[in-house]
Image (spheres, rainbow, N blue to C red):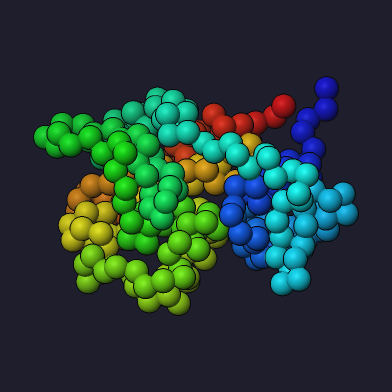
């Protein structure tokens, strides 16, 4: 039995992405959201337009064709995300000794869908349902880097400064988001709270679209070295779990 056809999966991911957005998206936004080369995305979009699955407006932006608009009604439920991530985030907290969390983009913020306390922690506040800023947390930065809706909600207006480390300048933030897309990893050190750091990575669905972020939080001393750089072992653990949760959604699996 033959395996999945990559071009079909990518085309389906483009349709899914466009269906989930309220406004048309440009070529660069689509390519960045799905980690595709612009030439690849352009070719797929051309074919989708030819079969009228996608429409291109006069500004050169793309949206779902009128006959397919109904497929945009389905959104990932936080309970569904929690079910997929549960076992992996428990293991992540156990291996790193840090709190593990999973987030998704909702209404201009990163919504915590699952939270596992750090081993031995005295903290008693469960963060499920809490909304955290996109631009000042590792979980949020992942969503900001890959989700066009998240980017539109933040990059079109001034952002709040929480500490002296919070990145509020748009050019600086855009450069960091580009690095996140290239490296597949986000870090925030003292940006939302002075002594708190975070490391996060994207969770992808079968088509490669980023549906959530998973990561760890803890004190700066726990997560970083003397130069405030994230510890490599912790980065590796977060990336491993992100790939594992993505497989639960079908990403990277053979048919």
The residue lying at 54 percent from left, 38 percent from top is: 75
Of all residues shown, which one is farthest toward the right? 50
* The C terminus, quarter of image: top right
* The N terminus, quarter of image: top right
Please say if 237 is above or below 153: above
Residue 7 appears in the rendering: yes
Q: What is the quadrant of residue 234 in the picture? A: top left
* Relative depth, front residue between 96 and 73: 73
Of all residues shown, which one is farthest toward the top? 1
Residue 96 appears in the rendering: no
The x, y position of residue 125, in whole percent, is: 18, 37
Count every numbered label the image shows and give the total.
0
The x, y position of residue 113, in whole percent, is: 37, 37
The residue lying at 48 percent from left, 57 percent from top is: 150
The residue lying at 41 percent from left, 55 percent from top is: 108
Please say if 51 is above or below 180: above
The x, y position of residue 52, in whole percent, is: 84, 51
The residue lying at 77 percent from left, 62 percent from top is: 56
The x, y position of residue 114, in whole percent, is: 35, 34
Please say if 155 is above or below 77: below
* Relative depth, front residue between 3 and 77: 77
Give the side of residue 201 with respect to residue 22, left or right. left
Give the side of residue 208 with respect to residue 115, left or right. right
């Amino acid at each position: 039995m033959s395996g999945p056809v990559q071009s079909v999966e990518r085309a389906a991911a483009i349709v899914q992405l466009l269906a989930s957005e309220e406004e048309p998206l440009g070529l660069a936004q689509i390519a960045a959201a799905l980690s595709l080369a612009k030439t690849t995305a352009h070719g797929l979009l051309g074919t989708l337009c030819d079969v009228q699955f996608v429409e291109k407006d006069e500004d050169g932006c793309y949206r779902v064709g009128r006959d397919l608009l109904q497929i945009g009604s389905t959104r990932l439920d936080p309970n569904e995300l929690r079910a997929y991530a549960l076992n992996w985030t428990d293991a992540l907290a156990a291996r790193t000794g840090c709190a593990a969390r999973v987030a998704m983009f909702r209404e201009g913020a990163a919504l915590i869908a699952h939270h596992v306390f750090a081993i031995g922690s005295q903290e008693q506040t469960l963060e499920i349902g809490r909304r955290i800023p996109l631009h000042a947390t590792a979980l949020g930065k992942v969503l900001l880097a890959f989700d066009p809706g998240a980017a539109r909600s933040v990059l079109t207006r001034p952002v709040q400064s929480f500490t002296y480390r919070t990145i509020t300048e748009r050019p600086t933030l855009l450069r960091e988001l580009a690095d996140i897309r290239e490296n597949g990893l986000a870090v925030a050190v003292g940006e939302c709270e002075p002594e708190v750091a975070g490391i996060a990575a994207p969770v992808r669905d079968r088509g490669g679209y980023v549906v959530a972020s998973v990561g760890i939080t803890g004190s700066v001393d726990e997560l970083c070295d003397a130069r405030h750089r994230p510890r490599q072992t912790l980065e590796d653990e977060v990336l491993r779990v992100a790939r594992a949760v993505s497989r639960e959604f079908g990403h990277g699996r053979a048919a």
